[in-house]
Image (spheres, rainbow, N blue to C red):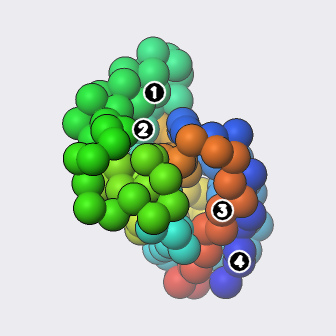
């Protein structure tokens, strides 16, 4: 098991493909299944296109529209106006991913990247746990 620490600069998608790939492929296994788990309720994990940055911009804009910061809209506002919208976005995207390992390599598609999706406005320190089972 490995704990990957991710520093964010606030809301947005942070690509972690390189770090995840380096750890998983460095374990010496030929086949297996990698599980990634985000240990937070206001950030999430997604696999998304990593070629065109407009995809990430459109995703961020869509989520802002679907779960806006709106004072008085949510009961839960203990940690600020961005708190409940962040929980909603994490619930919609999820905190766990599974990626097959074959031939010693992650089975990601050509344009797929692994991202931590930060939903809070302030910079955060996040932790993603990586666990690989295989042979």
Eye-nearest disc, 2 or 1: 1
Mark 2, Cα crowd under 10 Å, few <14 / some 14-19 / many 20+, is some
The residues bearing labels 3 and 1 have C-alpha atoms spaced at a distance of 19 Å
Q: Mark 4 vs mark 2: which is more N-terminal?
A: 4
Taking the image as drawn, is residue 85 in sight?
yes
Residue 39 position, x and y percent, is: 54, 73
Say which residue label 4 marks: 2
| SS label for mark 2 | strand
The residues bearing labels 3 and 2 have C-alpha atoms spaced at a distance of 19 Å
In the image, is 75 to the left or to the right of 87?
A: left
Say which residue label 3 marks: 126
Residue 32 position, x and y percent, is: 50, 75
In the image, is 3 to the left or to the right of 103?
A: right
Say which residue label 1 marks: 56
Q: Residues at badges 4 and 3 in contact (C-beta under 8 Å)?
A: no
Hey, which quadrant is residue 84 in on the image?
bottom left
The residues bearing labels 4 and 1 have C-alpha atoms spaced at a distance of 27 Å
Eye-nearest disc, 3 or 1: 3
In the image, is 105 to the left or to the right of 123?
A: left
Q: Mark 4 vs mark 1: which is more N-terminal?
A: 4
Eye-nearest disc, 4 or 1: 1
Q: Residues at badges 2 and 1 in contact (C-beta under 8 Å)?
A: yes
Hey, which quadrant is residue 54 in on the image?
top left
Q: Which residue does the image show at 71% across and 74% down from the upper left?
A: 3
Q: Mark 4 vs mark 3: which is more N-terminal?
A: 4
Residue 40 position, x and y percent, is: 52, 69
Between 20 and 29, the one lying in front of the other is 20
Q: Which residue does the image show at 45% across and 22% down from the upper left?
A: 57
| SS label for mark 1 | helix
Q: Mark 3 vs mark 1: which is more N-terminal?
A: 1
Residue 58 position, x and y percent, is: 37, 21
């Amino acid at each position: 098991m490995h704990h990957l620490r991710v520093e964010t600069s606030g809301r947005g998608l942070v690509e972690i493909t390189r770090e995840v790939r380096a750890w998983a492929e460095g374990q010496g296994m030929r086949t297996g299944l990698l599980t990634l788990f985000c240990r937070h309720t206001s950030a999430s994990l997604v696999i998304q296109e990593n070629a065109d940055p407009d995809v990430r911009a459109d995703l961020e804009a869509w989520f802002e529209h679907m779960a806006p910061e709106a004072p008085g809209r949510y009961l839960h506002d203990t940690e600020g106006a961005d708190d409940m919208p962040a929980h909603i976005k994490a619930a919609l995207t999820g905190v766990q991913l599974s990626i097959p390992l074959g031939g010693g390599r992650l089975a990601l598609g050509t344009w797929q990247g692994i991202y931590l999706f930060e939903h809070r406005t302030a910079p955060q320190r996040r932790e993603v746990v990586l666990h690989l089972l295989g042979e």
